[in-house]
Image (tube, rainbow, N blue to C red):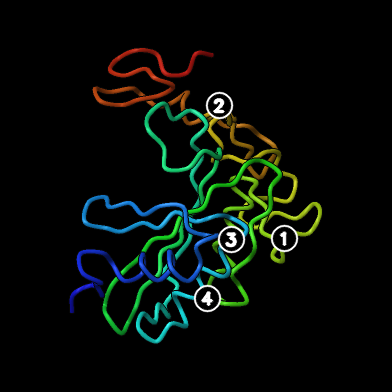
Amino acid sequence: MPNPMVDTERMEVVKVREKLPNAFIKPKEFREETFICVKREMIRDVIALLKNDPDLQYDYFSECLGVDYSTWEHERDLDERFEVVYNLMSLKHSSRIFVKIGVNDGQKVPTLKYIFLGAEYPEKEIADLYGVIFDGNELAKGERFLLPDDWIGFPLRKEYPLGGEDVLFDKGEYGPAVEDVSMPHAGESFEGKTGSEDVSGR
C-alpha cells in the first residue's frame, strides 16, 4: 500500500504542519524516506497526532535513537548538538515516518512512554549513552541503564575516548586492552588513522 498523500506531499507532513504549526519546523526527504523536524518541547503532541489521527494511525513504535552532531561539519537539519530520531510505523498503510527533534546538553525531552510504552527502554538507553534527559523517564541518581552504576561519562558522545582500557579478570589480574593485541589492517580506522599505522598511541 502506498504512503498516504495529499497531492504531492506526504499526508503526515500536511497534518503536522496544519494542525500543529507551532511544532512544525520542516520536512526532509532522504533515500526515499520522509523525516519531519519538529520542536523538542512539542514532541508529545506531534507523536500523539500521528498515532491517533484516523487517516494516519501510526500505532507502532519501532524505535528512537540518539545522534551526537558535535563534530559534524556538514549541513544539518537542526541546530542543537544532539538529535533524537523517532521511527514510527502505520500498520494501516504499511508506511514509515521519522520524526526528529534537536536537544542541547541539559535540556529535557518529554518522554513518550505514556503514549507508547515501548519508548521507555530506548529513551533510557539514549539517556545512559548520550546523557540526554527524558522528562518523566529519568534514570535514578547514581543509576545506569546499560552500563555499570559506577561508569563515568556517556560513551556515545563524540568526545569520549576510544578504547584503551585494560581488562580486569576475576582473579584480580589485568589483561591487555583490545588495541594492544589488535593488528591494524588496510581499511581499519582508529582516531583518523588507517592502513598499517600504529592505532594505540600509547
Label 3 crowd bin: few (<14), some (14–19), many (20+), radius 10 Å: many
User: Closer to the observer: label 4 or label 1?
Assistant: 4
Which residue is depicted at the point 47% across and 31% down? 178
Q: Given contact means CB atoms under 8 Å apart, are the residues at marks 4 and 1 in contact?
A: no
| Residue contact between numbered discs 2 and 4, judged by CB atoms under 8 Å | no
Q: Which residue is mark 1?
A: 138
Query: Which residue lies at the image location 37% right of the left edge and 29% below the top edge?
Result: 74
Say what secondary structure mark 2 lies in. Answer: loop
Instruction: Please report contact status of discs 3 and 4: CB closer than 8 Å, yes or no.
Output: no
Say which mark, if any, is on residue 123. Answer: 3
**Residue drawn at (50%, 13%) of the image:** 201
The amino acid at mark 4 is Ala
Q: Are marks 3 and 1 in contact (CB under 8 Å)?
A: no
Q: Give the camera-side residue of 20 and 34.
A: 20
- The residue to which callout 4 is attached is 48
Image spot of residue 55 (x, y percent) = 35, 83
Distance from disc 3 to disc 1, alpha carbons, whole Å, reads 9 Å
The numbered mark at residue 164 is 2
- Which three-letter amino acid code belongs to the residue tagged 2? Gly
Q: Residues within 10 Å of mark 4 (few under 14, many from 20)?
A: some
